[in-house]
Amino acid sequence: MLTKRIIPCLDIKDGRTVKGVNFENIRDAGDPIELGAFYAEQGADELVFLDITATNERRKTLSELVTRIARNVNIPFTVGGGISSVDDVSVLLNSGADKISVNTSAFKRPELVDELSREFGSQCVVLAIDTRFENGDWYVYLNGGRVKTEIRAYDWAKEAVDRGAGEILLTSMNNDGTKQGFALDITALLSRNLNVPVIASGGAGTMAHFKDVFEIAQADAALAATIFHYKEIEIQALKTYLYQEGVNIRF
Amino acid sequence: MKTVIIKYNAGNIRSVLFALERLGVEGVVTDDPEEIRAADKVIFPGVGEASSAMRYLKERKLDQLITSLEQPVLGICLGMQLMCKYSEENDTPCMGIFDVDVKKFTSPVDNLLKIPQIGWNNITGLYSTMFEHVPENSYMYFVHSYYAALGADTVATANYVINYSAALQKDNFYAVQFHPEKSATEGAKILENFLKL
């Protein structure tokens, strides 16, 4: 049986991992290669590396980093951050990334999703959505959560899947950094209605939160950063817990 | 020992190269028929679409070359599917090394099936030297929308709504639907076993 996936996310800036709490107050949490290999050994099912470097050097630095990760990590990984063209993706996949994620660039030019899935296959195109609940619905936010749109997260996710996105990485800004649990309602809405896997992100604080997002919201995967980086929850212990709770997990 | 990885338009070649490197083996990526024929081990990877991959192989007669190889050959993912008889993906006749067809996953009436299958699934009924010291029910990483049906050459089974071939073997031809190069230590063990054949 296909198992639910546990995915640590590593935010990368200038070749180092960082994690913002509620997208601010960034703190240094270690070397990406070392941390990635450590998580793989601990039983992580995949890794996500999100590059938030803004300098002109970023593209070359990132592809070199991706090669170093691919060399040392024996599980699949996704690379995201600032990707806006077929060329960007080509470089990253050729450097050894298994998948890439697109966010703002795809929202601004949805044809990018068609182009990427046509060129490289849906299986390596992850659509990342940052969403916030306000005025009774979940809306898409862009630019790392700084820019609001009037489009509902579900509508954008549906369109992206129709255009060829192979997975949705859904981050709830309301929940991110709170450690109060994942956003179960919007995760469930996407997971039940879209025929691609949904990765839930934002809000993990306890092991029970993972059980809830898998069982109640039917997420296919759950992503977290801070709690793993600071060893508040260790992946092995989390997987043991989920296994004992009857969640289908690689163990 | 020389291990070649066949170069064509549907590769996840870098990942395979790195996985070999972690096992201390330097793979050579090539589409040169002489070099492929002279190799001790041949790996035929693949991520992509069946009909364009088959067209590319046929134009270069690589399909005939692969079929005629006598050393151990390992097909991975799309590579495995192209070694089967026929693929439903754009109605594509394939190499026919394995006497099974490749079909698309379909949702049962009462359940929305996520396609492609992406993630870790367990493999059972392991029956090949490539699985030596690989425990039953080991988890492997799969990414695919099409699957090879069960057949006489099935040497490992996985289940995603239905049972299908997770691995096939016939004579010197070995093939896996999952990605051993991305399947942690158990996946590496399969590659290591193949290299030792």
Image (cartoon, rainbow, N blue to C red):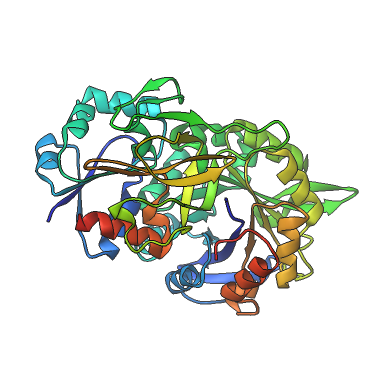
Q: Is residue A148 visible?
A: no
What x and y, as percent, mark residue A241? 66, 72
Q: Position of residue A33 (x, y in %)?
A: 43, 70
Drawn side of residue B106 relative to residue B31, left or right = right
Residue at the (13%, 53%) spot, across then down: B2
**Residue at the extreme right of the image, as rendered:** A135
Residue at 31% x, 51% y is B128
Position of residue A178 in the picture relative to residue B120 (left or right): right
* On screen, residue B9 above or below A11: above
Residue nearer the viewer, A112 or A119: A119
Where B156 falls versus B196 (above or below)? above
Determine the image quadrant of residue A81. Answer: bottom right
Q: Residue at x 79, y 69 (%)?
A: A180
Residue A78, given in percent of the width and then of the height, sits at 50, 54
Say how many tags the image has: 0
User: In this view, which residue lies farthest toward the bottom?
Assistant: A231
Residue A206, compared with residue B110, is above or below; it is below
Q: Is residue A145 visible?
A: yes
Occupied quadrant, residue A52:
bottom right
* Residue B63 in the figure: left or right of residue A209: left
Q: Quadrant of the C terminus of chain A?
A: bottom right
Closer to us: B145 or A60: B145
Say whether residue B190 is left or right of residue A231: left
Q: Quadrant of residue B80?
A: top left
Percent across and percent down for residue A197 are 62, 46
Relative to B41, say whether A178 is above or below: below
